Amino acid sequence: MSEVKERGFSRRNFLRAAGTLGISGALLGASVSGVRGQEENRGGDVSSAGAEHSSHGGNETTGSVDTSQFDPSEFLRDFYWGEERREGGGTVREYEITAEEVEIEVAPGVVYPAWAYNGQVPGPTLRATEGDRLRVVFKNNSEHPHTIHFHGFHPANMDGVFELVGAGQEFTYEFGAEPFGMHLYHCHTSPLRKHIEKGLYGAFIIDPEEGREEADEMVMVMNGFDTNFDAENEVYAVNTVAFHYQKNPIEIKKGELVRAYVVNVLEFDFINSFHTHANFFNYYPTGTKREPSEFTDTKMFAQGERGIMEFRYDFPGRFMFHAHVSEFAELGWMGLFDVKE
Ligand code: CU
Ligand code: CU
């Protein structure tokens, strides 16, 4: 308890200092880019914005992130179904996943040295239908050994724990898609925390055989980044880039069913949460049952916990969603739905 308190306190002090002094991204990370975003970042960044304004609306970063490499707005509704083919009367889906080292920009001018699947954090959202045969060809192009550990049912040798895939090596995971639900995959090489905090994770959706009701579907991976390597997160987000959906609101249609697949992959912090403004959602834990467990506007998530949220907005306009852990919200975990008529 005292450790948690102390950590939270020191981080707030860090923010206060940053806010007062107007520290730029340079202090946030050991490897902040000297190239990208430096000019526009001068005089303000994720931390100073958070410290100056404790009210909801005022938090934002100045400057913008280069989204040519990874655009959270595109990632949101991008599903990787693999290459589909029929084999022995069933559907086989073949995916290609590569592990590599890559620098990613998590806030304007703040570049994090990530380990990534297919060059992006989160990795691609893998999607399949219950009963499909999945073949995941994994190539390790990084300098460290890695694996892919999938949540779901599979044999022991497909669990991505003991079969380390060394630098330059390849491994093919093959198993059936079950059970239906919202799952995740991540590296399971030890030290585990390191391999997850560096960015080796992604969402893994298995649709029920009979499908789900037509909806506007999106994926939200709640994550964070320890940009100065002090074993706590300085930047929080949904889909990696702090405040991205605040600056680029997610357009949805009034009255249309929205289905958000949500997973928490934060390291260092035990609890994350998701809160929607002016609306409630049906919540399906792990997405494994057809009946919602709850109708609420705030849901708490432990590490690795995930589920499906379904909702409709009856009023047009902009509505905030954010972590109800206020500190995370102020450090980037905040966004907007823009409801159109
Ligand atoms: Cu790894
Ligand atoms: Cu896991």
Image (tube, rainbow, N blue to C red):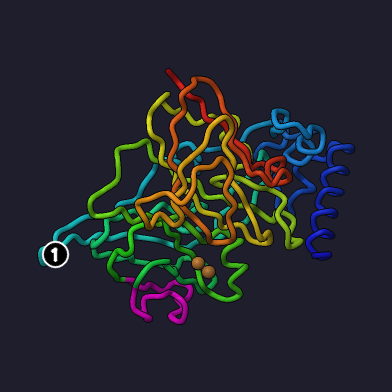
The answer to whether residue 7 is left or right of residue 200 is: right
Q: Crowdedness of circle 1 by 10 Å Cα count: few (<14), some, many (20+)?
A: few
* Residue that appears at 32% across and 59% down: 95
The image quarter in which residue 1 lies: bottom right
Query: Is the stretch drawn in magenta largely helix, strand or loop?
Result: loop
In the rendered image, the vertical position of residue 45 relative to residue 27, given as above or below: above
The residue carrying mark 1 has its beta carbon less than 8 Å from ligand 2: no
Magenta segment includes 336: no
Q: Where residue 50 appears, x then y in whole percent? A: 76, 38
Q: Nearer the viewer, residue 264 or 288?
A: 288
Q: Nearer the viewer, residue 142 or 128?
A: 128
Indicate whether 318 appears above or below 104: above
Residue 6 in the figure: left or right of residue 85: right
Q: Position of residue 286 (x, y in %)?
A: 44, 57
Which residue is identified by label 1?
87
Boundaries of the magenta span: 154-173
